[in-house]
Image (spheres, helix red, strand yellow):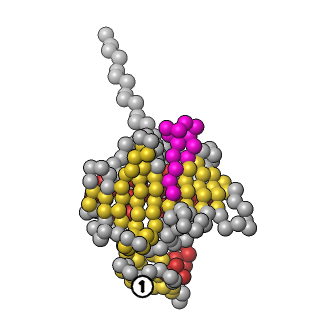
Amino acid sequence: MSILVEQALISPRYLAGPGDAAWVTFPLHEASGWTHGHEPLRPRVFLSSPDQKTLLRLEPRPGDQWWRITHDSGTPATSWYASFGARTPVELIAAVTDTLTDPSFNERALCDATRPLRRAGWQTAPSGEFRSPDGIVKGERLNFSGAASWFITAARGQDDVVWQARFDGSTPPAIVAAFTQALADPEPLRRSTEQTTGLSRRRVSLRWQQWPATSVALVLPERIGHLAARRTTPPPLPPAAPPTPPRPTR
């Protein structure tokens, strides 16, 4: 008889709490080859991409962003950073890192970051501002030195900010679009009993379900395996050359 464990399905997902940081950090290291350089006796994580151009930092900072991703391409125009507050669900941050580490990622690809929001019924404006149907999440674009940065905030009220995500004006549109797509996904997020401790129930729908413990334990390894497969899958074969027409005969 399999052991069952309780898991909470929480919606809206942007109020599900942070979850487990391993959802982001383990795949970067084990599936994408990022190296860690943090000190084991300090509560922080540093991960560097194989080309050493991108750095992820997870560092507890009271009153400040805990997650930071910086990309240094060597030129200011294409270098960028993103940051996320402590209570940002890790699934939203993972949407960014999964896109960034995808072998097919094209940093120059043009994407409309508000398109996933419109398709999900969110209010959007030509300026880039947007709002979730329940009014909890708001996004805006602010110009700094000629570049429009994204500020996305989840708040239950004017004085109750849950988290904020920031993307500077040089962030590839595909990165921002990956975040907004995960943000607008109606699928609830799963949390363990421990991860719901201290979670505010205000404006949150929480439904408990029982899952086999073996199934729960495999969720992260399966995610890592799926992401690792992206790097080992061979590219599609080029189209076959057209047959050579027969040579005319006399």
Foreground pick, 8 / 163: 163
Q: Secondary structure at mark 1?
A: strand
Q: Quadrant of residue 190?
A: bottom left
In terms of depth relative to the viewer, which is nearer, 234 or 135? 135
- Identify which residue is drawn at 50% across, 40% down: 78
Work out whether 97 lies above or below 10: above
User: Residue at (42%, 49%) from the top-left corner?
Assistant: 149
Q: Give the total number of marks visible in the rendering.
A: 1
Q: Is residue 143 above or below residue 222?
A: above
Q: Position of residue 231 (x, y in %)?
A: 54, 50
Q: Is residue 170 visible?
A: yes
Residue drawn 63% across and 52% down?
48
Q: Is residue 224 visible?
A: no
Q: Residue furthest top?
A: 250
Of residues 14 and 230, the one nearer the viewer is 14
Identify residue type, mark 1.
Answer: Trp
Residue 100 image position (x, y, % from top left): 50, 51
In the image, is 164 to the left or to the right of 131? right
Q: Position of residue 157 (x, y in %)?
A: 37, 73
Residue ID for mark 1: 208
For the C terminus, give its image quadrant: top left
On the image, which quarter does residue 204 sit in?
bottom left
Residue 73 forms part of the magenta stretch: yes
> Residues in magenta?
71-83
On whether residue 78 falls in the magenta region, the answer is yes
Q: Residue at x 64, y 57 (%)?
A: 46
Q: Provide residue 98's location: percent of width, then percent of height.
A: 49, 56
